[in-house]
Image: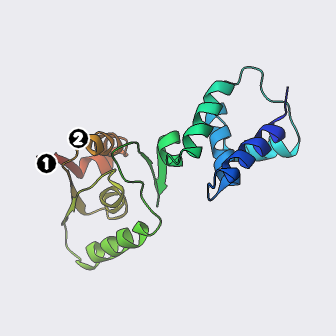
Amino acid sequence: MPTIGVRLADTSRRLAAAGVASPDYDAVVLIAHTLGWEPSDVRTRAARDDAWPEDADLDLLESRTTRRIDREPLQHITGTAHFRNLTLEVGPGVFIPRPETETVAQAAIDAAVAMNQDIVRVTDLCAGSGAIGLSIAQEVPNARVTLVEASDEASVYLRINARSQDPDVRARVRTVLADA
């Protein structure tokens, strides 16, 4: 049976041949997600040329690799996206939070802090996954954040992400599902 290193190299080669922009990174993430490991575990075990786990689901890895080759976002395949201090659930119907959006979140956080009020009310329209509004709620303790979303698909992820926050943040966040 091929080793982890061989599977990693093969997955990366297939992604590169398909024109995926970050084939090595994506291959590590896909294998880690499939095996329930951290990416660092995949890299370490590949470097040691450890054997591929006998109970690993190769069909699942193949399915995920094919989805990525077909240009499905990596975050939709893994179901999560990282944004600032948050790990958000994402999937079809919700935009993946981009690194550039962290600049927008920081500007909103800075503006909320600069208001220097006991309570700062913030509304995040078209909140999607909740990345911006939840970042504000997490990083500005006196913020009361309303997250508004009209998309039925996106609102599922918005509610999940809002519920997953610690109790203090959850208490200061309200989700509103607007009519589209």
Q: Amino acid at mark 2?
A: Asp
Q: Position of residue 83 (x, y in %)?
A: 46, 58
Q: Whole-Å distance between the Cαs marked 1 and 2? A: 9 Å
Q: Which mark is residue 152?
A: 2
Which residue sits at x=33%, y=45%? 93
Q: Along the horizontal axis of the image, is 4 left or right of 74? A: right
- Residue at the extreme right: 48
**Looking at the rendering, which quadrant does residue 2 occupy?**
top right
Q: Nearer the viewer, residue 97 or 15?
A: 15
- Residue at the extreme left: 179
Which residue sits at x=25%, y=62%? 143
Q: Which structural element holds mark 2?
A: helix
Q: Along the horizontal axis of the image, is 81 left or right of 26? A: left
Q: Position of residue 147 (x, y in %)?
A: 22, 53
Image quarter in which the N terminus is found: top right
- Marks 1/2 in contact by CB < 8 Å: the verdict is yes
Q: Which mark is residue 71?
A: none
Few, some or many residues within 10 Å of mark 2 (<14, 14–19, 20+): some
In this rendering, the answer to whether 108 lies above or below 152 is: below
Q: Position of residue 107 (x, y in %)?
A: 34, 75
Q: Along the horizontal axis of the image, is 83 left or right of 65? A: left
Tag 1 residue: 180
Return the disc, 1 or 2, that comes first in the chain's sequence: 2
Q: Nearer the viewer, residue 25 or 164?
A: 25
Q: Which structural element holds mark 1?
A: loop
Which residue sits at x=47%, y=43%? 76
In this rendering, the answer to whether 159 lies above or below 18 is: above
Q: Amino acid at mark 1?
A: Ala
Few, some or many residues within 10 Å of mark 1 (<14, 14–19, 20+): few
- Residue at the extreme bottom: 114
Q: Position of residue 167 (x, y in %)?
A: 33, 44
Q: Along the horizontal axis of the image, is 90 left or right of 72? A: left
